[in-house]
Image (cartoon, grey):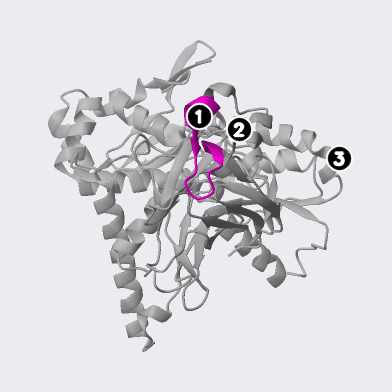
């Protein structure tokens, strides 16, 4: 399966907040929350193994952490670091931790389900399926399209409805005073969302269960009649009171109601809440199918839904209506990796010192940069230019899993470039060097030439052995076809040993806001 996520991702960076706020308003560092959660997961896993009388050493366990596909390299690096702090894995044990993308794991589940249901699902070589990851956050396609402009999420609208009916201040006060019951309210809302349209009912009302504690709190803090508040409530043009004229009589029908055990909202309002989110998904799905009509013609056989929102009966109903006109069937499943290649969103490379003759012939390396960064190497007395971008993989380039591209660099000179990961040889740039560090950069340009306008992802520190001579080389291998960039170093000593090293990511700009999209 080929992952073409990068063709559809936005240019915004995926970020994590420096602090997370609990339901009762207490702020805690993200590192504390994630590390604690990972420790808890490990504890529960070990308790399960013990209960099942499964005894083995921890260093024999391989852990898999799933993350959203839109997470940036830096954020995946953070998760990897937090997992190490939680003692999930050790750098001394190869491949003990796998960072896997959620849609790829879901895709694996879908393929296994297809294998187990040969009598129901006819799927042959060359057929395609579309996987749509519809979680609580950003919907993602397996032709992976990220929809970042859907602000009218159902959860946000339902919170606005509760704020409008019961008052925003009262809702915040209830959240702070009884966070446990507030979480229970959110769970009741989620259950109600999942139940909607199970019976394909478009008229009448659909209910949200209200806890005794919530009702008592609101009765104590609101002097108005709660039943009247709900019946007079209007949202998205859907009023709680409807006038019906019958002969000479005028009847008032309450479509929104409150009986202290349930909050009932009209089915027409529920459908509008869902349509606000579903219609943009359908529009972009239709555009994607039309754009790739020649490629997918008679090959796209299934549409597979994963994520919490995929359980919605109303969503499935609307998507079936559109897919029936474009595909032979629609199989909906709630479901590492069967990915064979990925298309790279950015150009990746490192900062290198190149011969001045080479830089003068490069179309994107100007004289201003050359004059500012040229120097004479004290090893070979040749003139070089620093801060030049040496491309490992270029933007839009397909990269196979485990691919290696060789680029041999001696004293900053590129000698070759071929094959499949990135296998790079380095040597000292000056006699005084006691060690080296390699900075990993990315750019939205194809082969930008220089690193001055590129984003520095992080660096790799490599200390030289005491007997490392001026003309010796060391080999650094970059694996770009995996879910995270992986790096190994081979240094000449008593023998050549390849060891994995960690990228020290630059997290200076990532503590911003919630994920917005980056791959």
Residue 453's disc number: 1
Q: Which residues are magenta?
A: 369-388
Q: Decide: marks 3, 1 in contact (CB < 8 A)? A: no
Image quarter in which the N terminus is found:
bottom right
Q: Residue at x 60, y 28 (%)?
A: 365
Q: What residue is drawn where x is 34% and y is 63%?
A: 84
Identify the secondary structure beneath mark 1.
loop
Q: Residue furthest front?
A: 381
Q: Which mark is residue 448?
A: 2
Q: Quadrant of the C terminus?
A: top right
Q: Is residue 204 left or right of residue 90?
A: right
Q: Is residue 200 visible?
A: no
Labels 3, 1: front one? 1
Task: Tell whether label 1 touches label 2 (CB within 8 Å).
Answer: yes
Rendered location of residue 9, percent (x, y):
59, 37
- Image quadrant assignment for residue 39: bottom left
Q: Given the current orientation, which residue lies at the most extreme top position?
A: 248
Find disc 3 in the rendering and name its residue.
294
């Amino acid at each position: 399966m080929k992952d073409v996520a990068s063709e559809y991702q936005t240019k915004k960076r995926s970020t994590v907040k420096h602090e997370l706020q609990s339901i009762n308003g207490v702020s805690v560092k993200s590192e504390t929350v994630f590390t604690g959660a990972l420790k808890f997961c490990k504890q529960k896993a070990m308790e399960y193994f013990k209960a099942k009388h499964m005894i083995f050493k921890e260093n024999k366990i391989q852990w898999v952490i799933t993350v959203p596909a839109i997470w940036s390299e830096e954020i995946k690096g953070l998760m990897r670091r937090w997992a190490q702090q939680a003692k999930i894995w050790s750098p001394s044990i190869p491949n003990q931790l796998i960072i896997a993308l959620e849609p790829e794991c879901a895709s694996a589940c879908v393929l296994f389900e297809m294998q187990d249901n040969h009598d129901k699902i006819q799927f042959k070589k060359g057929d395609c399926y579309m996987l749509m990851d519809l979680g609580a956050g950003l919907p993602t396609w397996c032709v992976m399209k990220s929809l970042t402009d859907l602000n009218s999420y159902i959860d946000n609208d339902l919170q606005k409805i509760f704020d409008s009916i019961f008052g925003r201040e009262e809702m915040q006060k209830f959240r702070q005073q009884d966070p446990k019951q507030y979480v229970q309210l959110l769970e009741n809302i989620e259950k109600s969302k999942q139940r909607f349209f199970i019976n394909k009912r478009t008229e009448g009302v659909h209910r949200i269960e209200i806890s005794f504690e919530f009702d008592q709190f609101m009765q104590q803090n609101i002097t108005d009649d709660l039943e009247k508040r709900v019946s007079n409530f209007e949202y998205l043009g859907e009023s709680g009171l409807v006038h019906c004229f019958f002969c000479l009589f005028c009847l008032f029908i309450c479509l929104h109601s409150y009986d202290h055990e349930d909050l009932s909202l009209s089915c027409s309002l529920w459908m509008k809440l869902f349509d606000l989110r579903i219609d943009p998904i359908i529009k972009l799905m239709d555009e994607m199918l039309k754009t790739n009509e020649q490629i997918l013609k008679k090959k796209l056989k299934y549409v597979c839904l994963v994520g919490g929102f995929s359980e919605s009966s109303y969503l499935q109903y609307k998507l079936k209506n559109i897919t029936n006109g474009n595909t032979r069937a629609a199989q909906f499943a709630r479901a590492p990796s069967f990915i064979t290649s990925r298309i790279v969103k950015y150009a990746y490379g490192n900062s290198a010192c190149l011969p001045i003759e080479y830089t003068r012939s490069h179309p994107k390396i100007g004289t201003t940069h050359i004059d500012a960064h040229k120097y004479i190497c004290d090893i070979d007395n040749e003139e070089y230019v620093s801060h030049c971008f040496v491309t490992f993989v270029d933007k839009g380039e397909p990269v196979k899993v485990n691919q290696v591209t060789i680029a041999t660099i001696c004293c900053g000179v590129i000698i070759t470039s071929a094959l499949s990961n990135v296998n790079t040889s380095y040597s000292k740039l000056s006699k005084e060097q006691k060690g080296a560090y390699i900075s990993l950069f990315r750019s939205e340009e194809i082969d930008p030439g220089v690193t001055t306008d590129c984003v520095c992802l992080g660096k790799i520190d490599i200390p030289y052995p005491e007997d490392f001579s001026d003309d010796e080389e060391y080999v650094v291998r970059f694996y770009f076809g995996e879910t995270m960039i992986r790096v190994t170093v081979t240094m000449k000593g008593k023998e050549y040993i390849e060891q994995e090293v960690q990228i020290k990511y630059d997290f200076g700009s990532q503590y911003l806001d919630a994920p917005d999209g980056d791959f």
